[in-house]
Amino acid sequence: MKGYTEEELEKDLQNQEYKYGFVSNFETDRAPNGLNEDIIRFISEKREEPEWMLEKRLMAFNAWREMVEPEWAHLRYEKPDFQAISYYSAPKQQKKYESWDEVDPEMKETMRKLGISLEEQQRLTGTAVDFVVDSVSVATSFKEKLKELGIIFCPISEAVREHPELVKKYLGTVVPPTDNFYAALNSAVFTDGSFCYIPKGVRCPMELSTYFRINEGGTGQFERTLVIADQDSYVSYLEGCTAPQRDENQLHAAVVELIALDNAEIKYSTVQNWYPGDKEGKGGVFNFVTKRGLCEKGAKISWTQVETGSAITWKYPSCILKGDNSIGEFYSVAVTNGYQQADTGTKMIHLGKNTTSTIISKGISAGFSQNSYRGLVQIHPNAEGARNRSECDSLLLSDTSGAHTFPYIECKNKSAHVEHEATTSKISEEQLFYVRQRGIDEEKAIGLIVNGYAKEVLNRMPMEFAVEAQKLLEISLENSVG
Amino acid sequence: MLTIKNLHASIEEEGTEILKGLDLQVNPGEVHAIMGPNGSGKSTLASVLAGKDGYEVTEGEVSFVGKDLLELEVEDRAKEGVFLAMQYPVEIPGVSNINFLRLALAEKHKYEGKEPLSGKDFLAKVKEASAIVEMDSKLASRAVNVGFSGGEKKRNEIFQMAILEPKLAILDETDSGLDIDALRIVAGGVNKLKSDKNAVILITHYQRLLNYIKPDFVHVLYQGKIIKTGDSSLALKLEEKGYDWLIEENAQ
């Protein structure tokens, strides 16, 4: 395989009967649309991966080919054409704006709304564009400092090369390649993502964060994250997805695996703000994400998410509570406006004794959107003394939106204790009048009330993220009044 | 400051006319008490002045500091300086009193073209305002009215008034449901906030409140009109004799 270049691939592919052929000039390092074994070999080659990694990919690809896209979610959309997507895109030449004036005014406006100062806006736009045209970008500042503690934090492509023993041992153990349709696809074609390893007994002194930006049009984004917290270690991990994109539906199918070994703790926070589509519901990101964590003895995994973006969200960050006394938590705020649809929730799988899980889900639906909570609490026969508490609240901001709750509880141990509460409410006229009578306009009043409603979850966010999340809530609910 | 001329208003859904040609003139430095039997339109007047949905003004005009009040949105009336202390203050879960008021004050300052207060200055103001209504500063950081007792809610209204410093404060039955100590504190707060630049309209059923806040004028509202205006002695007379004599007098 060595020495196989994209020119050769181009030649090979041209010689085949290939439906979509080569579209673009290959100097931009963009794979042709469509998915086949050669594309997977190409990605693996591009990533300078060892043979074992390629095998994993091919295995996943073969499994994916046999699978069908799931239809059980409360979502309606036109299924993506997986052969119409380019699975690799990383231009050699990074496009930059020549001047501030060339920057999309809407992007400027969004930044202004996010409270980013003009200088910062200019600086960030430069960066953002680099991110947008690059496949995936991983910010790994403070690398040296982390290294002193033995913490590894790097792009997963680098980890595959530099730390194969860890990747081999853990990748695909929590989310097997055959887990589901999108996970299989991701396992076959993922291009990059983050890798993190915290050694035994180490408390990571800072929050580790990754910002994902979506690609140019016509491409899919498939990032892969693997976080391993060794025994008695702790890490807080932040993931931000904040790139607006303005044309057709784009596919985002990520996989995140967390492994918390004995008595370790992982806190994973996400602010998801992919482009939700326009006012008529055109465009937007299809977000099909598999996130799952495994807790060994006494370990704890806490998922906190603020979901405001995407046209379609299909996402269930889950915990497998394998070890005795392990703890799983899920705190979620999901906002849908316009024609957005979200089907999100969690799975708490109690295998070990005295395992505990908490689920707090706050759904907010506005416009013509549909917002569903879907959760599974499963208590296995050996999970003596397991406990779960679930609280699922829905807030409706319009008469034309929908809020749905699909809680599944499977309890196979008599000593387990499972509680579920669900409420649906609307912002009352009285509340709005009260806030407005103090001089706060309707839009801000709704933002304030909604932020109050979501407080329990927002409070769990690391400080800097909480502020961003609050502002996002307000922005995503703009024009929701009516 | 506030001039109401021939105000007619009805409930939107039913079309029932509640205010039937009300006139009122309020000048800076004055305290007006509006009394009257149940269903005479007292709370409707407060709601219409604040701009609450569900009421339709069919005739008349209201000018406030030279502006057509009825043309303004609810929040703009507030920013112009109309404050309504509500009969039933609303709970807003998860929103701390202090954040709520900080936003409200910042919006008002923005409207007036002023810079918002620094965190330090704002906190000093909060402290001052808490002292005025003898409110535990812990209440300021709790969610707006959530889990507050009836008395605490009313006290919180006056606390908000102290922060926002309105030109015109309308107190809609602020005295209802208060024990004697809370009444003294709430009334004391209003007295401390009173100046020759602002005005207060007290809507009340009971003369009791007027022992604490001395009105310059007492108006009796009956069937959507002011049928009698007097000084504070009128309230005492009403307390003693009820409304019937006035209603009869008015009928003649």
Image (cartoon, rainbow, N blue to C red):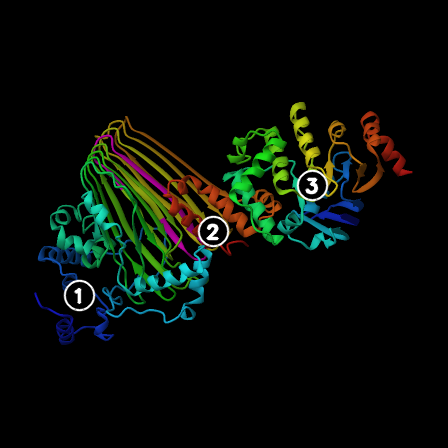
Q: The residue under label 2 is which amino acid type? A: Glu
Classify residue B211 by image quadrant: top right
Residue B229: x and y, percent?
84, 38
Are the residues under badges 3 and 2 in a single subunit?
Answer: no
* Disc 3 element: strand
**Chain assignment, label 1:** A
Q: Which residues are magenta?
A: A319-343
Identify the residue under disc 3: B169
Which residue in the protein does label 2 denote?
A: A474
Depth-wise, is mark 3 or mark 2 nearer the camera?
3
Tell whether A61 sits left or right of A426: left
Callout 3: 10 Å neighbours few (<14), some, many (20+)?
many
Which is more toward the observer, A65 or A473?
A473
The residue to which callout 1 is attached is: A39
Instruction: Return the disc, 2 or 1, that comes first in the chain's sequence.
Output: 1
Q: Residue at x 28, y 68 (%)?
A: A94
Q: For the residues tagged 2 and 1, is the chain the same?
A: yes
The three-letter amino acid code for the residue at tag 3 is Ala
- Circle 3 chain: B
